[in-house]
Amino acid sequence: MSATAPYAGPSPIRRPVAAAALLAALVSLVFGLLLAGAGPASAHAALTGSDPQDGAVVDTAPKEVTLSFSEAIAVGDDSIRVLDPSGKRADTEAEPRDLSEGGTVRYGVTLHSGLPDGTYTVAWQAISADSHPISGAFTFSIGAPSETTVALSSQEAGGGPVGVVYDIARYAAYSGFVLLVGGSAFVLVCWRGGASALPMQRLVVRGWLTLTAATLVMLLLRNPYTGSGKFADAFDLAGLQSVLDTKPGAALVSRLLLLGAAALFIAVLFGTYARREDEQERKDLTFGLAVGGGVVAAGIAATWAMSEHASTGIQASIAMPVDVAHLLAVAAWLGGLASLLVALYRTPDIGSASVRRFSAVAFGSVVVLAATGIYQSWRQVGSWSALTGTRYGQLLILKVALIAVLLAVAWFSRRWTGRLTDTAVASSGVEVASSRADEEDAATEPENTAPAAPDEASDDVAPERAAQLARQRAVLTATKKKRIRDADPERSGLRRSVLAEAAVAVVLLAVTTMLTSTEPGRTEEEAAGGATAATAPAADGPVNLSMPFDTGGRNGKGTVRIDLDPGRTGSNDLHVWIDGSDGEPMDVPELKLALTLESKDIGPLPVVPDRLAEGHWTASGVQIPMAGDWKVDVTVRTSDIDQVTIDKNAKIG
């Protein structure tokens, strides 16, 4: 089919709008689903142990409480709090002491002397070495468990509305980086004529604005994100100063400074460079922009590498430059893809040579991504079980699958590229199409709108009318170019395949961003292997037991029904009903319970419920110090000499 064949599909004017709307809808859908399902950012350092252990019952009060973590953390004055049963501080309220040695990360706080018996709550909050906030709580008891009035917030560190906005800013920052770096590289390497194309200028500038705005939001929200969770603390100067003293804060400030240099780069690229006509001067300026822009882009990428996954864990000195290379390859590929999509839909001048150059850039990016990705996967996952059994590993599998799909779609794009005919090569076809467009416009254009000759316009046409005619001529010229561009079936096919690539790339970028906020599989497995129930398990719901008994005396048969709510570690409400052999409520002179976790040598922990009504006893604040398979012993006395003790195991926690 020739370049002048008419296009039989939908209106070419509506197609770019529909394509842009489809891509925008896909972006909104993907990010909406990911943010809705992701919740607060997962902890990247994990609590691997404590002394005393979670749920432990010790005979004498310890002098200190220590916590061990899977990787380095940053702590403050209130990072570890020990609260007595009444909610008062049982520690000296000093900054936790660093007790780390060798490869073990451990912090401790000193307790007051002479602490009374009862249940104590340890609440902790810190910042992981890869910049993400982490928190948790557990209990231990001195002497015997007791009731506690401590009520901790159920909101995890980094959660709530502040966490949602912070996460949105993180996604926006990565997107802006991809458009800024990838768009600039596309203009310099693939299509130098794009420097004077307004759509390309808008794409790169919008990438810069998005990255800058997202970085400012993250800097302001960093204090409430890692602390109080309140938007009002975003403008707390003391909190902002403390953020600037941290590694993530320094990285965000460095990114803002580098974005200032990037603004100068953009001004030169779309200003001086776009207007340069001398070929030698243009080559010299291209080299200077490539070197300077490359340094700035690498610096911006390093602000992520120095404050997230790459900066902690094994081989950090190797992982950080590898992470920079990975981010730059992602930006060159996905940002170049977005630029190609804009160029194909919004400009008439890009030809097959530019598309082929981008194909080579994309291939090189894929090679870099494969090499760096394999290393990062080994470093962050470490085992096949972590690859399939952790959230990080599952997201990594999804990312690899998306890259495979993207490469398959790119293969079709490359086939269309081979068929693409440049405007300059098919000049005769363009001239025919242009003449046909002129004839159609002449037939439909009203006579009174025909543009006046240049020498007549100044004498016979008012300035306002001349400006109107100039605008009409510009619109007609743009319409002619659009008709010529859309009449090329190869170009239309390439646009469709590139749009499909961009759709997959949006999902890929979202998954990549999610990986940065998910606990690496290696550390998750290490934490699980060394944990001592340091974090409270999720509640499975109330525990319900039914236990028949027979004391051997008169009216000594019946059934004990027990409800333990919510049936998890911590404080629980206990209800006990006794039904006689006739199914009616039955009163007994004495009822006692005891809880024993034999696997941990905990207990028996006595529980003496109070009679609430006929055949109904209750107890509040029943403490379950640790999740496990508990044995519930029930002693029922039906007379002065007739009693029996029955037991049943129940999974609690």
Image (spheres, rainbow, N blue to C red):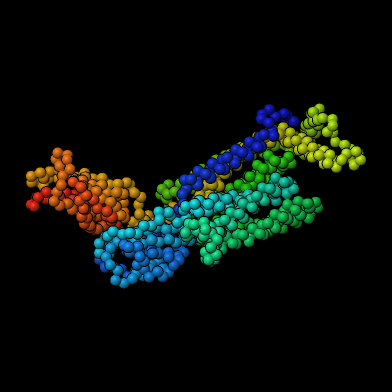
Q: Residue at x 43, y 69 (%)?
A: 95
Q: Position of residue 22 (x, y in %)?
A: 60, 38
Work out which quarter of the rendered image holds the N terminus and state it: top right
Rendered view: 59 above or below 426: below
The total number of labels drawn is 0
Observer-nearest of 50 and 490: 50
Q: Position of residue 430 (x, y in %)?
A: 78, 34
Q: Is residue 206 left or right of residue 118?
A: right
Q: Residue at x 27, y 60 (%)?
A: 146
Residue with the most extreme bottom position: 113
Q: Residue at x 14, y 48 (%)?
A: 588
Q: Position of residue 226 (x, y in %)?
A: 48, 59
For residue 307, say whether it is visible.
no
Q: Is residue 438 left or right of residue 520?
A: right
Observer-nearest of 440 and 349: 440
Rendered view: 247 above or below 401: below
Quadrant of the image occupied by residue 152: bottom left
Observer-nearest of 458 and 138: 458
Q: Residue at x 40, y 54 (%)?
A: 154
Quadrant of the image occupied by residue 89: bottom left
For residue 369, say whether it is visible.
yes
Q: Position of residue 11 (x, y in %)?
A: 68, 31
